[in-house]
Amino acid sequence: MRTGVSLKEKLLSLIFPARCALCGKMTAGGRRVCDSCLKNNPPQARFRLLEEPEFSLFCVSVYAYEGQARQAILQYKFRGRKERAAGFAQALTLALPPRWQTVDVVCWVPVSRKRRKERGYDQSELVARKVAKAIGRPCRKLLEKVVNNQPQHELNAAQRWENVRNVYLADNKKVRGKTILLIDDIVTTGATMLECASCLLQAGAKEVFCGAIAESLLDI
């Protein structure tokens, strides 16, 4: 069974024990999810087809956005718990189909400059960079958020689609002809993922795959 833990990480864990991404407790062997959380909140590949009139694409996530996983993600995003990125990235890497691990480049759904300055980091970027390192692919900033729009979680399903229109801009020179893995933290309606993927495809990307830490199927 794959654990997603390299020999280097196992050796480092002898000196600097890893911590569980969900509960924060120390783990053995460099693993990023402890035995208790594996039992109660096991990560698993959750494939979902995201659709809009022009195109569709698949997204894989590893947690349902509820319970302990939801609390861990909220702490990661809003309470400075950056160390949890490693565990989320490890779980997501294990869920990626083999073909998705041979992309040309990994990128992420960016937050605005204002939000990044307030938070001190971009949560999706941290996970994307660790996933890219795990699969041996480069990680590049291919998208920029050019409009500081209203947070998606404050809106209903219909409003979310309109809220992300023309919010992102792709770097054509870096995107053209590339197969891309796009990373975000949470996928709900899929509006943000589809808008970003659309930007990448319009900029000349050959193909786009999507990965997220968690999916929310709430009736919004």
Image: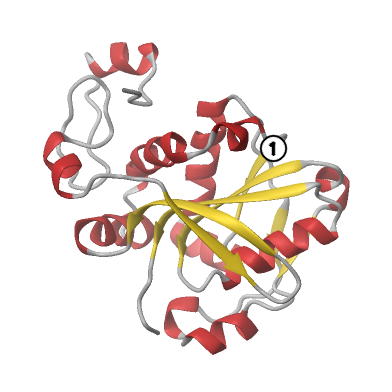
The structure residue drawn at horizontal position 70% and vertical position 78%, both measured from the top left corner, is 165
Question: Does 177 sit left or right of 110 as displayed?
Answer: right
Is residue 72 rendered to the left or right of residue 109? left
Number of marks in the rendered image: 1
Who's the residue at 23% across and 34% down the image?
19
Q: Quadrant of residue 28?
A: top left
Q: How is the image coloured?
A: secondary structure
Rendered view: 107 above or below 154: above
In which image quadrant can residue 25 be found? top left
User: Which residue is drawn at the image coordinates 23% and 47% (left, top)?
Assistant: 22
In which quadrant will I find the C terminus? bottom left
**Disc 1 target residue:** 105
Residue 212 position, x and y percent, is 47, 53
Question: Judging from the image, what secondary structure is the residue with disc 1 in?
Answer: strand
Residue 20 makes an appearance in the image: yes
- In the rendered view, tell whether residue 113 sits above or below residue 92: below
The amino acid on which the numbered mark 1 sits, given as a three-letter code, is Val
Q: Quadrant of the N terminus?
A: top left
Using a 10 Å C-alpha cutoff, classify the residue at mark 1 as few (fewer than 14 neighbours), some (14 to 19) or many (20 or more). Answer: many
Decide which of 29, 117 is in the foreground and name it: 29
Residue 112 visible somewhere in the drawing: no
- Measuring from the top left, give residue 166's x and y in whole percent: 74, 76
| Residue drawn at the location 38% of the way across and 59% of the way down | 77
Q: Quadrant of residue 217?
A: bottom left
Residue 175 vs residue 59: left or right? Answer: right
> Residue 29 at x, y = what percent?
23, 19
Q: For this rendering, which residue is in front, 217 or 172?
A: 217
Rendering coords of residue 84 (x, y %): 33, 44
Left or right, 85 with respect to 56, comes to left
